[in-house]
């Protein structure tokens, strides 16, 4: 067995219980500095936290001195020694090395991650090494915490986690932005009919909501949208709760509670990483996160939103007009300038939204809801579902859908149909919002965008 090390995070958290003792730490060298006073300082990082542990190598120890030339940035090593109080400023502890094992060297000439700031564009090209940077390491830890707390949020409220299919026969959103699934070296359809990578688990989640009451999905979704923006991915993760016996107001309440609780959890548990983002990525970050917790969401109808935009006096690239989709610039105006808080826009024109949304009494709009937040724009999209058989059929006909393909979905309205509602939270948009990273490509370990898929 490989000797295990104590996570550096653990050491910083409870160093008093380790002081004076011999311990082991495993990690990767960030830097090495040799002083004239006969000591070398190695900054070691193990990914458990942002902080490095300083390892002291005394030049009095010949076997360690021999290794120095290969203890270079990027090397994977194990350091064993005594944990001591550090005399240096800014760090409470350091490790006085007795033994070092070098598992893997990293040639200083060809190792791409040197101790300087690299651009995110450059780091994306070396996506196999970028998790070793401070920023991507911190994003990864926050992303992990967010997944955990989202599951906890729904589990604590009695929701069942449903694994909806990744290969599907329907295009839930009806936008035609699907990837086809075909088997290599096979002429005919593998599944006997055309199949796609799912754009959303919603329709299947509805099946289970109408049996178990409260369910959610948390899985990958795929969209062949040819948009190269800082908030679109071709493969992204979505959390989709679906609740039976619920309407649009219940839906809004759930979305608001969810966002508030998960942001609070990250503030409570990812302080070091968030402080790092606030310092190097986005100085307004903490204020923005606290705003989510303190300020109730502004709820406005689409019609009101368009009116506000028309009367704003702003020069938009695409002027807002009733019947047109809200653009990123409109979303940002509403959240960042007008209301300075999250804004839920409800009751969109039915022509703009998919077939499954409940038609409102005015017959012009549907019970949709988009939650917009500063910086990111739309983070949540959802609706009350059309549960009346006849109205649903009419909607589907209007959208030129093939009713045969959706017989099962219509069946849910023929047998025990009840009001129900749900939404989708874009997980990477949430990570973007919580970390402040400008581009969504930094919010996911392996970004897939038009023209770009590594590994
Ligand atoms: O608004 P959307 O398309 O809604 C649905 O898919 C519904 N079926 C959800 C539901 O009601 N169960 O997508 C939901 C969210 C968006 O608000 C956005 O945050 C995110 O998913 N999203 C994307 N994130 C990254 N890249 C893309 N291309 C995205 N498209 C949507
Ligand atoms: Mg949407």
Image (cartoon, grey):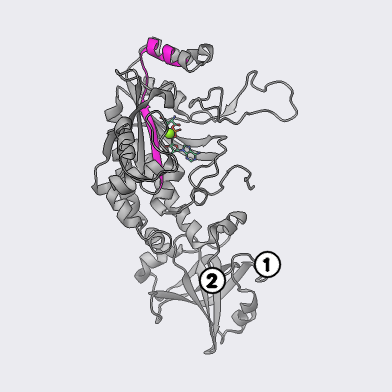
- Check disc 2 and report its element: helix, strand or loop: strand
Q: Say above or below: 349 vs 380.
A: above
> Badge 2: few (under 14), some or many (20 or more) residues near its Cα, within 10 Å?
many
Residue 273 locus on image (x, y percent): 40, 59
Disc 2 or disc 1, which is closer to the eye?
Answer: 1
Residue 189 visible in this rendered orientation of the protein:
yes
Q: Which residues are magenta?
A: 376-396
Mark 2 → mark 1, Cα distance in angstroms: 24 Å
Q: Is residue 262 left or right of residue 109?
A: left
Q: Quadrant of residue 325?
A: top left
> Badge 1: few (under 14), some or many (20 or more) residues near its Cα, within 10 Å?
few
**Residue located beneath label 2 in the image:** 79
Residue 1 visible in this rendered orientation of the protein:
no
Q: Say above or below: 324 vs 6.
A: above
Work out whether residue 348 or residue 311 is closer to the camera in this orientation and state it.
311
Residue 204 locus on image (x, y percent): 46, 24
Residue sitting at x 37%, y 56%: 270
Residue extending farthest to the bottom is 37
Query: What is the number of the mark on residue 33?
Result: none
Work out whether residue 400 or residue 412 is closer to the camera in this orientation and state it.
400
**Residue located beneath label 1 in the image:** 110
Residue 198 locus on image (x, y percent): 53, 30
- Check disc 1 and report its element: helix, strand or loop: loop
Q: Is residue 365 left or right of residue 402?
A: left
Work out whether residue 368 or residue 191 is closer to the camera in this orientation and state it.
368
């Amino acid at each position: 067995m490989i000797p295990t090390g104590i996570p550096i995070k653990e050491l910083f958290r409870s160093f008093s219980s380790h002081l004076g003792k011999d311990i082991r730490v495993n990690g990767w060298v960030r830097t090495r500095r040799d002083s004239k006073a006969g000591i070398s300082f190695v900054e070691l990082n193990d990914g458990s936290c942002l902080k490095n542990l300083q390892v002291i190598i005394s030049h009095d120890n010949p076997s360690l001195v021999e290794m120095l030339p290969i203890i270079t940035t990027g090397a994977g090593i194990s350091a064993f020694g005594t944990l001591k109080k550090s005399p240096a400023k800014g760090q409470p502890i350091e490790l006085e090395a007795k033994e070092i094992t070098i598992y893997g060297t990293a040639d200083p000439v060809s190792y791409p991650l040197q101790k300087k700031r690299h651009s995110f564009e450059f780091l994306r090209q070396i996506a196999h090494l970028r998790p070793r940077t401070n920023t991507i390491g911190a994003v990864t830890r926050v992303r992990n915490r967010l997944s955990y707390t989202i599951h906890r949020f729904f589990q604590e409220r009695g929701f069942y986690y449903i694994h909806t299919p990744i290969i599907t026969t329907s295009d839930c959103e009806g936008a035609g932005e699907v990837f086809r699934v075909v088997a290599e070296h096979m002429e005919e359809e593998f599944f006997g009919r055309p199949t796609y990578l799912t754009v959303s688990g919603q329709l299947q989640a509805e099946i289970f909501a109408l049996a178990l009451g409260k369910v959610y999905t948390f899985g990958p979704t795929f969209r062949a949208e040819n948009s190269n923006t800082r908030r679109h991915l071709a493969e992204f993760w979505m959390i989709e709760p679906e609740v039976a016996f619920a309407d649009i107001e219940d839906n809004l309440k759930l979305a608001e509670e969810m966002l508030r609780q998960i942001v609070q959890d990250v503030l409570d548990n990812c302080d070091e990483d968030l402080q790092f983002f606030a310092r190097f990525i986005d100085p307004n970050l903490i204020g923005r996160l606290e705003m989510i917790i303190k300020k109730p969401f502004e709820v406005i109808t689409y019609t009101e939103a368009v009116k506000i935009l028309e009367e704003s006096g702003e020069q938009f690239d695409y002027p807002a007009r009733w019947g047109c989709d809200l653009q990123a610039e409109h979303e940002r105006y509403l959240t960042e300038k007008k209301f300075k808080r999250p804004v839920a826009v409800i009751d969109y024109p039915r022509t703009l939204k998919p077939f499954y949304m409940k038609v409102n009494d005015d017959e012009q709009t549907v019970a949709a809801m988009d939650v917009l937040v500063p910086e990111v724009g739309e983070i949540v999209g959802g609706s009350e579902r059309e549960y009346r058989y006849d109205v649903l059929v009419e909607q589907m006909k209007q959208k030129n859908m093939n009713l045969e393909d959706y017989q099962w979905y219509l069946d849910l309205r023929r047998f025990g149909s009840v009001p129900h509602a749900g939404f989708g939270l874009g997980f990477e948009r949430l990570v973007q919002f919580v970390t402040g990273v400008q581009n969504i490509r930094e919010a996911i370990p392996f970004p897939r965008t038009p023209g770009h898929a590594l590994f």
